[in-house]
Amino acid sequence: MADDTDAEADAPCRLWKLPGELRNRIYRYVLIQQEDATGDSMVNVEANGYDRPGLLSTCKEIRREALKIYYYENTFHVQIKNFNSAPLVEWKNHYMAKPGGRTCYCGFGGTTENK
């Protein structure tokens, strides 16, 4: 005889009975980070990565629905310490020198170059 916890695990998730718009509101409530002083929602990225909300690890279906909200509606702030930009600049210059080189938007030191 199965106990109550087995029956709950096999029961369909009630979240799927909600309309998609309401599920998206729930995802936003959980996934959008709090605003900082500038009004941006911010996720701090450090040397060892960043923490993703547990909601994204619950099941494939929720992850598929919620992942775009998490990545498109948050701002990720990255502070790089002891960064040597020489290889990046060399790559950018090489890439741009190729025939039919593409437009590259590269920001260095708080400025943005459009070449």
Image (cartoon, helix red, strand yellow):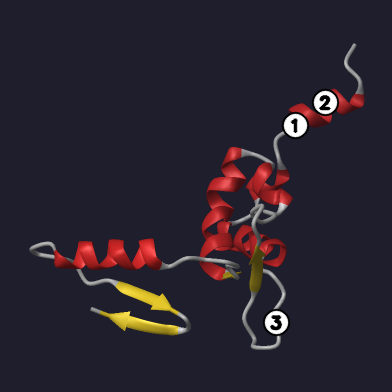
User: Residue at horizontal 64%, vertical 88%?
Assistant: 38
Cβ atoms at labels 1 and 2 below 8 Å apart: yes
The answer to whether the residue labelled 1 contacts the one labelled 3, judged by CB atoms less than 8 Å apart, is no
Residue type at mark 3 is: Asp
Please say if 64 is above or below 69. above
Q: What secondary structure is found at the residue carrying circle 1? A: loop
**Sequence-earlier tag: 3 or 2:** 2
Q: Residues within 10 Å of mark 2 (few under 14, many from 20)?
A: few
Report which residue position mark 3 lands on: 36
Q: Nearer the viewer, residue 101 or 21?
A: 101
Image: 29 above or below 13 = below
Residue behind mark 1: 11
Residue annotated with mark 2: 7
Which residue is painted at 51% across and 58% down in the image?
68
Q: Residue at x 88, y 16 (%)?
A: 2
Q: In which quarter of the image is the N terminus?
A: top right
Q: The disc labelled 2 sits on which kind of residue?
A: Ala
Near-viewer residue (68 or 111): 111
Residue 62, how many percent across, how many down? 61, 46
Q: How crowded is mark 3: few (under 14 residues within 10 Å), some or many (20 or more)?
A: few
| Residue in view at x 19 percent, y 67 percent | 96
Locate residue 58: give its quadrant. Answer: top right
Which element carries disc 2, helix, strand or loop? helix
As drawn, 114 above or below 72: below
Please identify, in this view, whether the residue under mark 1 or under mark 3 is nearer the observer: 3
Instruction: Please give left or right for residue 105 compared with residue 46 in the image.
Output: left
SS label for mark 3: loop
Please name the amino acid that badge 1 sits on.
Ala
